[in-house]
């Protein structure tokens, strides 16, 4: 049996067991907007810490699709990676990516932090909780979107990733994007924006408009949620909200 077939069978068992996050139900694909979340989001142009409103009933990601299989194969290829220095600098695990393999919308951050390194999932710490609110503010849930990072291992003391680390790891992110083929990628912060767009222009100049990527995918650079936290620049939430409204409109137009 081929690896691909084995992976597909493996994923199907998970689905059959009803393991959280797996469903064969196609209904979630219809992406019906959650009226509560949307109403709150449009009223929430004065976007505050509490912008998400009532949580949408979380649609579950379907597993067992070709894209899920391709992502699982890519994860397997990365393995317990030793390709760059980070593997020996205190990280606990590779943090691959999470969410809907068929997502129209993908978020790309910089690198896992302490919480992500511990839990094995991107954006689950303080900045991640803000990202979840940002997602919910446009009427979606984490299960609707796909979330990954440029660098998949935690840099020590949350330092910036070094160029060789970005160079070594980012091809895996590009392959994740090619598999998921979202309509829009939101590049969170300068590392994501610079890596995906091949520029070193300031994020303040890149954000606010859609950039062309490959396969017709558009990129919206915006500020990193960590930059929006109360001790940094929470006033920048308004600009992120402006960016997210552009993303929401593009997704609505493309249906
Ligand atoms: N910051 C990131 O860029 N990515 C994460 O996963 C968490 C924090």
Image (cartoon, grey):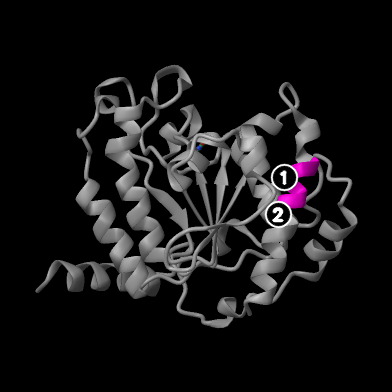
Name the secondary structure under disc 2.
helix
- The answer to whether any part of residue 149 appears in the image is no
Any mark on residue 244, and which?
2
Cβ of disc 2 within 8 Å of ligand 1?
no
Q: Nearer the viewer, residue 142 or 42?
A: 42
Q: Nearer the viewer, residue 14 or 107?
A: 107
- Estimate the x, y position of residue 141 in percent, counting from the top left: 63, 59
Q: Where, by quadrant of the figure, is residue 41 drawn?
A: bottom right
Establish if 248 lies above or below 15.
above
Q: Residue at x 36, y 64 (%)?
A: 179
Q: Main secondary structure of the magenta part?
A: helix
Label 2 crowd bin: few (<14), some (14–19), many (20+), radius 10 Å: many
Q: Residue at x 19, y 70 (%)?
A: 4
Q: Are marks 2 and 1 in contact (CB under 8 Å)?
A: yes
Q: Which residues are magenta?
A: 238-244
- The answer to whether any part of residue 112 appears in the image is yes
């Amino acid at each position: 049996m081929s690896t691909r077939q084995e992976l597909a069978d493996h994923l199907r068992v998970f689905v059959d067991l009803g393991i959280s996050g797996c469903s064969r139900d196609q209904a979630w694909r219809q992406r019906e907007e959650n009226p509560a979340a949307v109403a709150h989001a449009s009223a929430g142009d004065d976007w505050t810490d509490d912008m998400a409103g009532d949580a949408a009933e979380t649609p579950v990601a379907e597993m067992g699709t070709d894209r899920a299989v391709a992502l699982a194969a890519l994860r397997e290829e990365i393995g317990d990676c030793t390709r760059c220095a980070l593997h020996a600098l205190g990280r606990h695990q590779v943090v691959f990516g999470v969410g809907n393999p068929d997502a129209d919308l993908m978020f790309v951050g910089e690198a896992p932090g302490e919480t992500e390194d511990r839990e094995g999932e991107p954006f689950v710490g303080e900045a991640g909780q803000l990202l979840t609110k940002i997602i919910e503010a446009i009427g979606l849930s984490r299960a609707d979107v796909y979330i990954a990072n440029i660098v998949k291992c935690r840099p020590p003391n949350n330092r910036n990733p070094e160029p060789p680390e970005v160079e070594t790891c980012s091809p895996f992110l590009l392959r994740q994007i090619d598999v998921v083929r979202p309509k829009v990628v939101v590049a969170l912060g300068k590392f994501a924006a610079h890596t995906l767009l091949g520029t070193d222009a300031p994020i303040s100049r890149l954000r606010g408009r859609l950039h062309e990527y490959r396969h017709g995918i558009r990129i919206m650079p915006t500020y990193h949620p960590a930059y929006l936290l109360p001790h940094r620049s929470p006033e920048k939430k308004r600009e992120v909200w402006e960016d997210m409204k552009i993303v929401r409109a593009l997704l609505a137009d493309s249906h």
